[in-house]
Image (cartoon, rainbow, N blue to C red):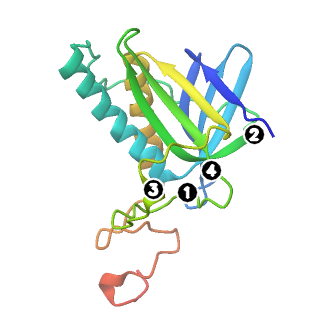
Amino acid sequence: MSHQVHAFEPPERFVAGTVGAPGERTFFLQARGGGRLVSVALEKVQVSLLAEKLEELLTEAQRRFGVQLPEPTVSVGDNEPLDTPVDEEFRVGTLGLAFDVDTATVVIEAIATGEGETEVEPDDSEDDDEDSEDEEPDETLDRLRVRLTPEATREFIERARRVVNAGRPPCPLCGQPLDPAGHLCPRHNGYHR
């Protein structure tokens, strides 16, 4: 079966968003442009790490290449819901980031999970397999590739952080998410909080 590369260079809109109630949300990256709409599902932790690593990438691009970065804004920016229909093209297994010096753009690539691959894998740094040397993602997997300006990247980062933080409030004692009915707090020896 052939793979698809959904390329948006640049997209009209590229956002992180969710579908569902807090505690049951499904996270998506969504790109729109040229009459196409592509939505890919991923985990909350992946959205959070993507925003964090994009911030680091912009800072490094400014330091190494002198790229002019927009200041973080306090404006709300794009706060619209995801475009409909939200049809999941694939579930993201790997995220890749790069900075293209020639065009001064950020390249984000979301790659589908492979066969038998778990959705989010822990980093096993003590694994000494000979085959695990900097494995590249399989070239036969579907991909979403987006190219953004530093300004659009900054807007994506701000929205992604708002989306991640819009979920259930954390317990003040243990930091785990509070359900409307409370939760069993380990700091209270399992008593319902």
Q: Amino acid at mark 3?
A: Ser
Q: Amino acid at mark 4?
A: Thr
In the rendered picture of this protein, how many numbered marks are placed on residues? 4
State the CA–CA distance, disc 2 to disc 1.
Answer: 20 Å
Contact? badges 1 and 4 (CB < 8 Å): no
Task: Name which of mark 2 and mark 3 comes first in the sequence.
Answer: 2
Which residue in the structure is indicated by mark 3?
132
Q: Where 61 sits versus 48, above or below?
A: above
Residue at image location 75% in from the left, 39% down from the top = 87
Q: Nearer the viewer, residue 127 or 16?
A: 127
Quarter of the image containing the C terminus? Answer: bottom left
- The label nearer to you, 2 versus 3, is 3
Q: Position of residue 135 (x, y in %)?
A: 48, 48
Quarter of the image containing the N terminus? Answer: top right
State the CA–CA distance, disc 3 to disc 4.
Answer: 17 Å
**In the image, which disc is placed on residue 22?**
1
Dividing the picture into quadrants, the one containing residue 55 is: top left
- Element type where label 1 sits in the image: loop
Furthest-left residue in view? 63
Task: Name which of mark 1 and mark 4 comes first in the sequence.
Answer: 1
Residue 168 in view, yes or no: no
**In the image, which disc is placed on residue 87?**
2
**In the image, which disc is placed on residue 113?**
4
- Element type where label 4 sits in the image: loop
Q: Position of residue 156 (x, y in %)?
A: 45, 29
Name the side, left or right, on which 84 lies relative to 157: right
- The label nearer to you, 2 versus 4, is 4
Q: Amino acid at mark 1?
A: Pro
Q: Amino acid at mark 2?
A: Asp
Residue at image location 48% in from the left, 57% down from the top = 131
State the CA–CA distance, disc 2 to disc 4.
Answer: 17 Å
Contact? badges 3 and 4 (CB < 8 Å): no
